[in-house]
Amino acid sequence: MTIAIAKTTKNAKPRVTFADYLTYSDGSDTKYELVDGELIAMSLGTGLHGETIDRVYKEINVEISRTAQPWIVRQGQIGVRCPRGIGLDTVRIPDVVVMEGNDWQALQEREAVIDFDLSAPLLVIEVISPSIKNIDYRAKRTEYAARDIPEYWIVDPLEAKVSVLINSDGWYDVTEFYGDELIISPTFPELKLTPRTIFSI
């Protein structure tokens, strides 16, 4: 697909609309996020990054099955549309997403982006990489709060900690967990998971 969008100034980048993003392909397997109207290629993570995502995903999946919740967990497959700036043209692809099963069914016949007509995810999780550390800690924190996502984890192998952010009146309150401390999650109150379990690779 070719995107033709007028530039307002000589140095301005063309803005990509949400509709364009949903159908965009450059012919490669590269995944893109849409950030304030700009396509941002997602870099390949390290082996540690991928292993950490996999461990978190498996633990959450087991807990959903154990508690028989009508939820779905997916890793790196689902976009989340977020308000940002002057437009509604930001889509993030979290490392792990927990969402309502009914909303997952609604995505079966359309692009895998949780748009504003669906409920916000119950939980999103980002695993830190050195190149995107500030984005996960700062930009995404603001975007996910604006999307009213009730719980956001930042899993940081660089500092061996898990930050659990709980949405309170449109902003996140954060608690950090280290070592053998049990991660306290309102979404998964019976979860028996520690940072040491996640990072003991």
Image (cartoon, rainbow, N blue to C red):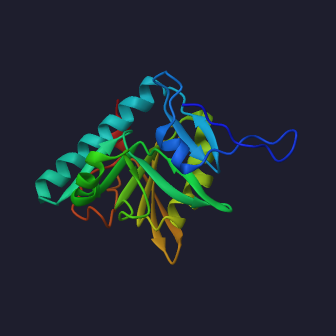
Residue occupying the point 13% across, 59% down: 67
Count of marks placed on residues: 0
Quarter of the picture holding the N terminus: top right
User: Can residue 192 be seen here?
Assistant: no
User: Can residue 54 be seen here?
Assistant: yes
Residue occupying the point 61% across, 38% down: 39
Q: Quadrant of residue 138?
A: bottom right
Residue occupying the point 49% across, 28% down: 45
Can you name the residue that lies furthest to the right here? 10
Expressed as whole percent of the image width and height from the top left, the position of residue 198 reads 34, 40
Q: Vertical placement of 187 versus 114: above or below?
A: below
Expressed as whole percent of the image width and height from the top left, the position of residue 37 reads 64, 48
**Along the line of sight, the residue nearer the viewer: 138 or 10:** 10
Expressed as whole percent of the image width and height from the top left, the position of residue 19 reads 52, 48
Quarter of the picture holding the C terminus: top left
Expressed as whole percent of the image width and height from the top left, the position of residue 168 reads 48, 75
Q: Quadrant of residue 85?
A: bottom right
Q: Quadrant of residue 84?
A: bottom right
Left or right: 110 with respect to 24? left
